[in-house]
Structures are given as C-alpha cells and as structure tokens.
Image (cartoon, grey):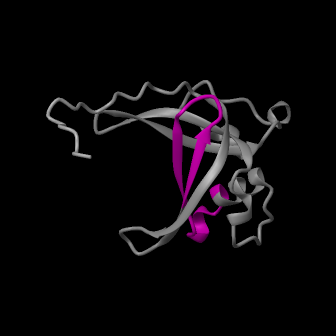
Amino acid sequence: MPMPDTSNAKKPEMKPIEKDWYEVKFTDFKEKIDKNGDLYLEVQFDFEDSNRKAWNNLSYNSEYLYGLKQFKKAIGAVDSEDNLTQYKGTRLEIFCKNRVYKESNQTEVVDYRPFGSGDTMPQAPKDEDDLSWMEK
C-alpha cells in the first residue's frame, strides 16, 4: 500500500483539560536518563472516558521521591517495590491541569490517589499554582 500524501496534514489541536481529578489506567512505564544523567521513571496513563493519554516523569533523585511515593501508593505498590510491571492496568485517579508548551496544550499530572478514594482526599486547589493542599 502506498504511503498517503501529507501535504495538507495539520497538527491536531488538543483541547485544554479542565483542572480536576480523572479516572485513568496505568498503562506503561520506562526508566530513562535525563540530560544531566539522572535516572527517572516515565509513566503513562489512559483516560477512562476518552482517547486522551497523559505522561509524567517521576524522579529517582532522593530530594524528589515524594511524587514516586504518591504514585506507588495510588497503584497499591509498597514503598520498597522496584518492579511495577504487575501494576499495569491498575485504575487510579490523577489530578491534572492544562499547560501550554510551544503553543500546544499539554496535560500536566500534578498528583495521584487510589481509585475511588476521592471522598477522603484533599480538594483540588482553587489557584492552580497553589500546591500546598498536596502536603496534607
């Protein structure tokens, strides 16, 4: 089959995501090395109510392990767990907000919680830059 002509192809415009908690499935992860040589975990999520996906990078740097800790807790992994393969497909909730990067809307993952635990978790912030609610 011949390759299609792409002369009229345009970059699809992603609609901005509303700042809120979303039900997702943890679908993939990869360990990567950043430009400074530091190891991190890239995690991927599929939204349950749309074709949207989200990714987040979780640092292995000892100063920034809280994000990885929250993610592990949300998927039911213990702190000492070092292989997340068995957790692929796990449902959880992620708090997302929109950010614009290079003139494109992107989904930014801000926090994690176990699926169905919304009644016991802190409410989302009214000011998107105020993340003090995550420390509770």
Q: Position of residue 68 (x, y in %)?
A: 65, 59
- Disc tally is 0
In the image, what residue occupies the spot 67% across and 32% down? 21
Name which quarter of the figure residue 33 lies in: bottom left
Q: Is residue 66 left or right of residue 3?
A: right
Q: Which residues are magenta?
A: 42-67
Question: In percent of the image, x 73 and y 58: which residue is there?
Answer: 87
Q: Residue furthest front?
A: 1
**Residue 136 in sight in this render:** no
Q: Is residue 123 above or below residue 25?
A: above
User: Can the viewer see residue 4 in this picture?
Assistant: yes
Q: Identify the residue at the far right of this view.
A: 120
Which quadrant would residue 119 be assigned to in this image? top right
Residue 126 on image: x %, y %: 61, 24
Q: Nearer the viewer, residue 66 or 23?
A: 23
Q: Is residue 66 magenta?
A: yes
- Compared across the picture, whether 36 is left or right of 53 comes to left
Nearest the viewer among 128 and 105 is: 105
Residue at position x 40%, y 29% in the image: 14
Tell me if residue 68 comes above or below residue 9 in the rendering: below
- The answer to if 54 sits in the magenta stretch is yes
Q: Quadrant of residue 125?
A: top right
Question: In the rendering, at what x and y percent does residue 2 appear?
Answer: 22, 45
Give the position of the C terminus as an image quadrant: top right
Residue 101 in picture, x, y percent from top left: 34, 39
Most extreme residue toward the bottom is: 37
